[in-house]
Image: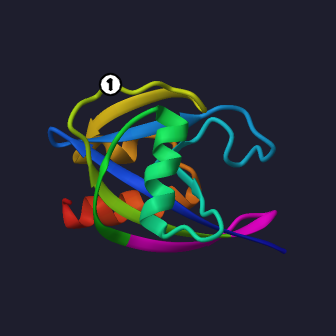
Amino acid sequence: MKFVEVVAAVIKFNSKFLCLQRGEGSYDYVSFKYEFPGGKLEIGESRQQALIREIKEELDYSIQVEHEFLTVEHQYPDFRLLMHSYLCTAKDVNFTLIEHIDYKWLPIHQLKNLDWAAADRTIVNQLVSQKA
């Protein structure tokens, strides 16, 4: 079974969270689902460095990493995922969708209304329970 370790940015701006919708992909169980942006670590990178790089690559966006939020381990049908999420802030909402097809800025009480990828849903549930 393939093992994938990633980082994810839970980006907050003006009391709203950035939710990104994936396009169609190799795995139908994550295609068109919402997620927090991020990606795989490269050799020699810290998690925070990987997060900043991935957000720049995926959104051409600058963020401030505040602190680690939640690490999630999830077993998908084709791979095992270990995702380290970080609470982040942004100075503006000026970014470009490069790898995603849609986005929403939502207040915490509306996050559960979206169709999230399973691993990200765990983060959403924790955010809502803590009212982060």
Tell which of 42 and 114 is nearer to you.
Answer: 42
Task: Give percent across and percent down for residue 82.
Answer: 59, 72
Q: Which residue matches tag 1?
A: 94
Q: Is the residue 2 above or below the residue 101 in the image?
A: below
Quadrant where the N terminus sits is: bottom right
Instruction: Work out whether residue 108 or residue 36 is closer to the camera in this orientation and state it.
Output: 36
Q: Residue at x 36, y 63 (%)?
A: 86
Q: Is residue 124 visible?
A: yes
Q: Is residue 44 above or below residue 21?
A: below
Q: Amino acid at mark 1?
A: Asn
Residue 85 to residue 110: above or below:
below
Q: Please report the bounds of the magenta region as a residue range.
A: 70-80
Name the residue at 54% across, 39% down. 57
Quadrant of residue 124 within the rendered picture: bottom left
Tell whether position 54 is magenta: no
Residue 21 in picture, x, y percent from top left: 53, 35
Provide the major secondary structure of the magenta segment.
Answer: strand
Measured as percent of width and height from the top left, residue 110 is found at 29, 41
Looking at the picture, does residue 89 appear above or below residue 80? above
- Farthest residue, direction left: 14
